[in-house]
Amino acid sequence: MNKTQTIDLLKNQMPGFYSAEQVINLIEKIEEEPVKPKLSVDQLREIANSIMIAIEEEANRDNIVCMDYVEFELNYDRRIEVTDVPINFDAIRDCVENSLTDAFEPLEEEDIVELEREETDNE
């Protein structure tokens, strides 16, 4: 039962020791905190390690740095300096997303719809 359902139920109840209005006012003041999944330090390290391995593999395949677009400048003392190194952030994001998907079970579509519905009801 969520906050909205509780308030609706209380509105239909007979008043007791506390009035329904008092109880509803108290419930409306409740702030719902988002629930974060709890993971052990070992689990966090394992996930971080799998992300790093995936990024290293992509880097070894030359998919992280766009080598064709690296820019250089020749300075006055004839030194070559790298001025721009384009990074393929999409490849990095894919590595992170795939590692997290492997570590956690994604929500099914009906779960997502239900969560969205609950958020809309609470507003």
Image (cartoon, rainbow, N blue to C red):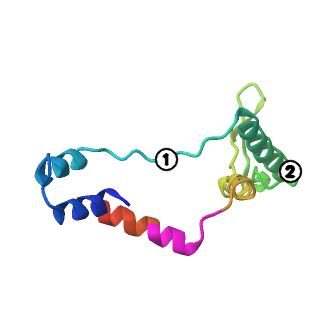
Pick the front one: 5 or 56: 5
Amino acid on which disc 2 is placed: Glu
Q: Name the residue under label 1.
A: 35
Residue bearing the label numbered 2: 57
Indicate whether 74 appears above or below 89: above
Label 2 neighbour load within 10 Å: few <14, some 14-19, many 20+: some
Q: Residue at horizontal 14%, vertical 46%?
A: 17
What's the residue type where badge 1 is placed?
A: Val
Q: Who's the residue at 87% across and 55% down the image?
A: 61
Quarter of the image that includes the C terminus: bottom left
Work out whether residue 123 can be spotted: no
Q: In which quarter of the image is residue 74?
A: top right
Secondary structure of the residue carrying numbered label 2: helix
**Residue at position x 53%, y 69% from top?**
111
The image shows residue 97, relative to residue 22, as above or below, that is below
**Is residue 12 at all visible to an observer of this figure?**
yes
- Residue 40 lies, in percent from the top left, at 69, 36
Q: Is the magenta stretch mostly helix, strand or loop?
A: helix
Left or right of residue 77, residue 123 in this image: left
Numbered disc in front, either 1 or 2: 1
Segment tinted magenta in the rendering = 106-114
Task: Tell which circle, 1 or 2, labels the residue nearer the N-terminal end.
Answer: 1
